[in-house]
Image (cartoon, grey):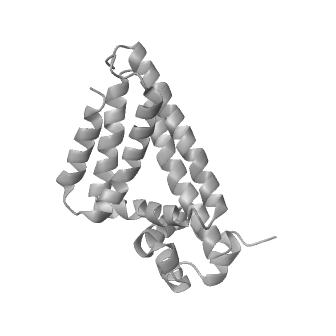
Amino acid sequence: MGRSKEFDTTMVLHKAMEVFGHYGYEGTSLQNLLDGLGIARQSLYDTYGTKQDLFVSAVKHYVTAKTEVVLAELQRPGAVKEAIARIFREGANVLKDERRRKECFIMHSAIDQVPHIPEIAAFFQQDVARLEQAFHEALVRAKEQGELSDRHDNLVALARYLNHARLSLTQTAKLTSVPQVLDDIVAVTLSALD
């Protein structure tokens, strides 16, 4: 009978998100991972496999958790525009929080690896399609509820815009330390729904 793991695998994935977010995929060494994760080399290999395997697991863990929050918000009964505003404001709040934003920076490394790691590329393709569909369904509901004006006639394009605007907040947070910049982008993005 094998020994049980002496560490929390979910917590290790969170730490991996921070390490990869800080150093980038290419810049993360095995020693960075061992120091950041606080586990032994053999435990790392036995549980996660290679550096790439750990990276893919961390990206999937991060993206899936974020996607589930967005989906839950978009599917909640009630005003759709308020739900979308909550999604964007919470995203900005996370990125303004020094501790929580470190995990978010794994997105830069993940996107950089799309041309090199087919599993990451396929995963992002599915996730983007899933989120665009959820935004679209929510916007259709908003239109039916009278929340959107008649000028909003291409809800597919608006859904794509909202999803990609949400993703771009992470890039902005890496380029500036001024919280007001994120708030301004959120405000202008949400004004597209008026």
Viewed as shown, does residue 191 lie left or right of 162?
Answer: left
What is the residue that sits farthest to the bottom in this orientation?
Answer: 31
Tell me which residue sits at (46%, 64%) in the image. Answer: 106
Q: Is residue 75 visible?
A: no
Q: Is residue 181 visible?
A: yes
Residue 59 coordinates in the image, percent (x, y): 54, 60
Tell me which residue sits at (60%, 59%) in the image. Answer: 120
Q: Is residue 150 depicted above or below 173 in this figure?
A: above
Residue 27 coordinates in the image, percent (x, y): 48, 80
Residue 143 coordinates in the image, percent (x, y): 40, 17
Question: In the image shown, does 43 or 147 lie closer to the viewer?
Answer: 147
Q: Quadrant of the C terminus?
A: top left
* Occupied quadrant, residue 102: bottom left
* Occupied quadrant, residue 57: bottom right
Question: In the image shown, does 12 or 128 lie closer to the viewer?
Answer: 128
Q: Quadrant of the N terminus?
A: bottom right
What is the residue that sits farthest to the right in this orientation?
Answer: 1
Tell me which residue sits at (40%, 32%) in the image. Answer: 158
Tell me which residue sits at (34%, 47%) in the image. Answer: 91
Viewed as shown, does residue 64 lie left or right of 4?
Answer: left
Viewed as shown, does residue 194 lie left or right of 68?
Answer: left
